[in-house]
Amino acid sequence: MKTSAPERERVVGSKVTRVDAVEKVTGLAKYAPDIYFDRMVHCALVIARKPHGILHKIDASRAQKLPGVFGIFTYKDVPGKNRLGEVVDDMPCLVAEGETVKHYGDVVAVVAASTQKTAEEAARKVRLTIEELPAVLDIEEARRDEIRIHGSSNVSVHKKIRKGDVSKGFSRADLIIEDNFMASYQEHAYIEPQGVVVLPDTDYGMTVYGSIQCPYYVQSSLSKVLGFPMSKVRIIQAETGGAFGGKEDVPSFVASYAAVAAYNLKRPARLIYPREIDIHTTSKRHPVKSRYKMGFSKDGEILAIEVDAYMDMGAYATLSPVVMFRTLVHAAGAYSVDNVSVDTYGVYTNKVPPGAFRGFGSPQVLFAVESMVDEASRRLGIDPVDMRMKNALREGSRTSTDQLLTESVGAVETLDKVNELSNWKELNERVEAFNRGSLFQKRGVGLSHIIYGVSLGAQGQHIDKSGAHVQINRDGSVDVRIGGTEMGQGAKTVMAIIAAEELGQKLSQIVVHQTDTAFVPDSGPTVASRTTMFSGNAVRIACKSLRERLVKLYAELNSCSEDEVELHDGMISCGQDKGMPFDELIEEAFKKNVKMFEAGWYQSPVLEWDPESGIGQAYITYSFASQVVVVEVDMITGNTKVLEAYTVHDVGKAINPEGVIGQIQGGFVQGMGYALSEDLKMLNGRILTDNFNTYIIPTIRDIPRVFKYGIVEDEFSEGPYGAKGIGEPSLMATPPAIANAISRAIGRRIRHIPATPEYVLNVIKEDAE
Amino acid sequence: MRINFRLNGETITTEIEDSMRALDLLREDLGLTGTKEGCGEGECGACTIIVDGNAVNSCLMLAAELDGTSVETIEGLTGSDGKMHPVQRSFIDKGAVQCGFCIPGMIMSAKSLLDKNDSPSKEEIEAALEGNLCRCTGYVRIIEAVEDAASIIREDRK
Ligand code: FES
Ligand code: FES
């Protein structure tokens, strides 16, 4: 139908100004710590400072006496179920006396006081008597199962892929490589720490304002902890100062602690994490230890791949079982391989539970598999680009889970483009020439080629849906409400573009509101680079219905054919008539009682998946990326500097090209920190690097001098205007590209990230292989 | 104790506790929540304000130290007519804003630089903004925004 398919897409793909930028540059934007209520109390947490032990006694008597303390709340004060956990509820909200403390940072009590300072002082005065138990502090120890953290085996999750016959593949191989890799923690380091304000509301329930990525998760957790029906728990997302996965399930915990205080005091309660508490108690990227074996023909074809990967889940499962699904599907990389065997295991340890982080369990294994492919290309004497090209996925290829790819496979195009963009051959010659003339500084060129499964995939299809609500007000302004959230990535701008495109209203008249569970039904989480596709489709569907009504009305008023009505940039016209401003048409619609609001709903197409064999349609579609970096390694200090970066992403369609570029740049630098400097140090389960003076994220001085990017648009028919996702792949290509570049520079393989100067120096000093 | 200082062009006289941080005075007592707290330890720059022309971390400063000074915060950059400072405009135009939490601090550091030097080199921009962490943008657009603002300021002076 003509009305639902605009002939020209004018706003989509154009350069627009972020819709939420003015508030952010003027300091008016309201983040959780900027929201104040009358009679509000300030909260602080009492955490266990032992990795493993029995909590015998909580003594709050000294803390209680401090002037300004309103209450100290423990497990006894939790009105509903004292349990948390999005996937498995194996985690207490507040650890009870007699229960075991399972990691340094387990939360025991919440203090509420008149000021933040008083609350923190009182929290320090609460005495915990903990009888220490021996702690399990690494994956190997956990696998031995001598100490069982949750009673049953520590190795509590196992997923697998069995495709083809790896032994046959290896028997045909001319070259077999086996190696081990370790990808360590990464802290999200969003600049705004976790924070919420929880208040008893006028519906006799609780309302939360918070720094939140997934409001519906918070709603369901709070309803359990408070024992309230979900209809009495309302979550309003405050402006959110970065999340990257770190505010996926954690805000459910943060809000639960504050809610216990708000419930007991019947007052608004504010809980803003100091940076140290944030780093000690909240999720991270999982450490993953992997063993790879790959077989190649002498002309570079990958014949078989076998992977075991162990993921450190920390003390509680949190999101790990879901994260592991992504690890599983991405472990064999972005290639067409007939024989694949992958096993991924999740193990409990007495450490802080990692969870979601941009890439969601895939960067760890993509680093490993891309290192393997690079090593093979070196040993076989095949150019790294040609090596990838030979094995790359194309339309008609099958993925590691035997999924047939039928459309939107921009993999080869990203390789072609990065080859061109980086001037690959010449770049390599340039670097070789430099190295011939330099003894202590060595440069290397690294390549990576990655795949990213968009949205939640086969194991998350039951929650893969999204709603939207669109309402046109009498003055022509438009309210758009979505279930996804804006965390900085630019979701609001993309949604506004889609609404403006479909309705023909001016972009400036579209307001995308803060996400509020009271307006839009459960839309799943804002994760997995799914918001453009899922919330975007829901907004588009709602707007299309409204557009049809407006077209019909205008055609009636002007006695013209509906087919000829055009809506564009705040004007509606038909054929050659002089047209009508959008707001005037809306006034007409109001007078005629035309319904001017609409709900949109989009759900994932059904995916066929067999969890036993790991065969089937793992994801609805895939994004691809290829990246080239040049590093310089100081052979005396082991220090690495990234000099140049070239990165090309297949995004399906860039609805907001400016936003895509922002994601590419930001993801690169975050990936660079992961690859090089972000070294989370622990001692006996306690994190030592608990602020930015010791946990080193990239500064403005660390970015490469040359930074070029390219966008491939191989459209996906299910995506709005063909769009896929970019949020996560932007980071994922970087760690392997950098690791491969260092390996080439020093002539030894990097097997651990972050590749800190100490680590690189050790590798340099190893005896030659 | 009682202190007196200029804040965004207005005179402020207020009673404070000796141990209060400048950041808390601004945010809690005076309601200027545009200045952010990211680390509380002088490492992230989210709390940057300008005191007597210099960019400083207000989380490391006592409120008492503001006595007798002239202070600028992000709220003071927009004129009463709503007109934004060129740095603010350029941050928008160049796409330098994502989550926005680092942005007030970034902008204050950039303004302090440009007040002293309207033709900074890339290295000078990097040196001025080194103490301001951003986890979203990868900094590329931030550098471009500061360069753009500098050229607008130079144009305006002509
Ligand atoms: S809050 Fe002051 S420097 Fe981070
Ligand atoms: S824009 Fe998010 S920290 Fe800078």
Image (cartoon, rainbow, N blue to C red):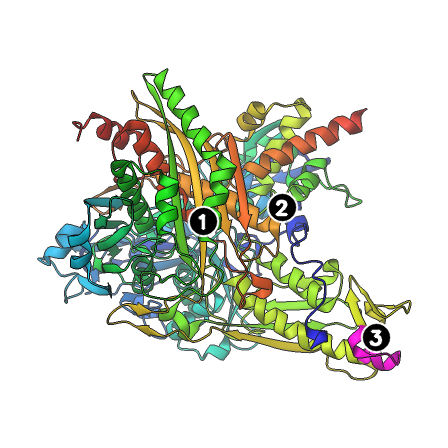
CA–CA distance in space, label 3 to label 1: 48 Å
Q: Is label 2 on the same chain as label 3?
A: no
Chain of residue at mark 2: B
- Which quadrant of the figure contains the C terminus of chain A? top left
Lower position in the chain sequence, tag 3 or tag 1: 3
Residue neighbourhood size for the residue with mark 1, other residues' Cα within 10 Å, grouped as few (<14), some (14–19), many (≥20) = many
Amino acid at dot 3: Glu
Residue under circle 1? A625
In this rendering, the answer to whether A415 lies above or below A430 is below
Query: Which label sits in the foreground, 2 or 3?
Result: 3
Q: Which residues are magenta?
A: A553-564
Residue under circle 2? B32
**Position in image of residue A682 (x %, y %):** 25, 42
Q: Is label 3 on the same chain as label 1?
A: yes
Whether residue A258 is visible here, answered yes or no, is yes
- Magenta run includes residue A554: yes
Residue under circle 3? A587
The answer to which of A123 and B112 lies nearer the viewer is B112
